[in-house]
Image (spheres, rainbow, N blue to C red):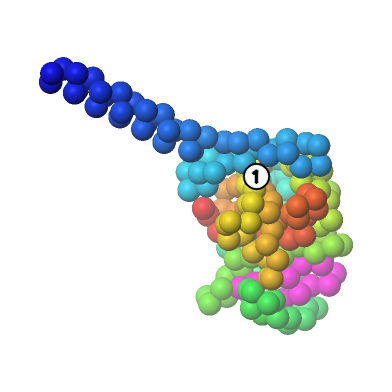
Amino acid sequence: MNKKIFVALGLCLLLMGCTALDNNETKKVETNGAGYINSENDKNKDVLDETQHNFSAEELYLNNTIKISSLVELNKDSMYILFGDEYNIINHAVLGSGYYYQKHDVMIILDEEDIAYIILVFENANINGVRLGMTVSEVQEILGDGELHYDDGEGDHYTEVRTIPYILFYVFEGFSLWFAGEEDGEIVDFEIRLWVW
């Protein structure tokens, strides 16, 4: 009798383990005829460490002139040296005020210690040819697969007042490139996030 109970208990535990593993699997998401990987376990650091990209940090440039890796730990003084003193202070609906450089078409958001932590990349700016308005698949063709997440509306990926279903990012040493895409795949938000995950 005890042997049957142990066998039944063992089978239950095995089935529960298989179900738990199934919940953390990646799923294929279809959009615009292309398949993308959707990781439902975005808290898993191993997934972030395996982010696939075609460029090293040293090969990424903003508008072919400013090395992205040189922006890590950028403070207000070095920002003036690198970008100049021709800027406007503008207010972002979510992130607060920042320094908008029209020449580079970027907005730099500083933290309370005057260290840059987000750089918003706008329409006329690019990183290795990647710019706003491209589709998720076009960005992936240039930068590599990256880490792609799909939000079916139940999650909390928001840009201003819109729900953004696609989140694509690339993790490098000290910074990441972060994209938000609409349901049709068009990239509507492009950020350089200057912090370590």
Q: How many marks?
A: 1
Is residue 103 on the magenta stretch? yes
- Which of 91/114 is in front? 91
Question: The disc labelled 1 sits on which kind of residue?
Answer: Leu
Using the rendered image of the protein, determine whether residue 177 is visible from the camera's viewpoint. Answer: no
Where residue 169 sits in the image (x, y, percent)? Answer: 65, 49
Question: Residue sitting at 65 percent across and 44 percent down?
Answer: 148
Bin the neighbour count of mark 1 within 10 Å (Cα to Cα): few under 14, some 14-19, many 20 and up.
many
Image quadrant where one finds the N terminus: top left
**Residue 32 in the image: above or below residue 118:** above
- Which of 12/166 is in front? 12
- Which of 183/105 is in front? 183
Question: Residue sitting at 36 percent across and 32 percent down?
Answer: 16
**Residue 40 in the image: above or below residue 186:** above
Where residue 43 sits in the image (x, y, percent)? Answer: 48, 48
Quadrant in the picture for residue 116: bottom right
Where residue 62 sits in the image (x, y, percent)? Answer: 77, 56
Specify start and end residues of the magenta stretch as a single range.
99-110
* Residue for badge 1: 148
- Which of 78/33 is in front? 33
**Residue 188 in the image: above or below residue 109:** above
Question: Residue sitting at 57 percent across and 48 percent down?
Answer: 173
Is residue 18 on the magenta stretch? no
Dominant SS of magenta comes to strand
Give the farthest residue toward the left. Answer: 2
Give the farthest residue toward the front. Answer: 1
Where residue 144 sits in the image (x, y, percent)? Answer: 72, 38
| SS under mark 1 | strand
Question: Residue sitting at 12 percent across and 20 percent down?
Answer: 2
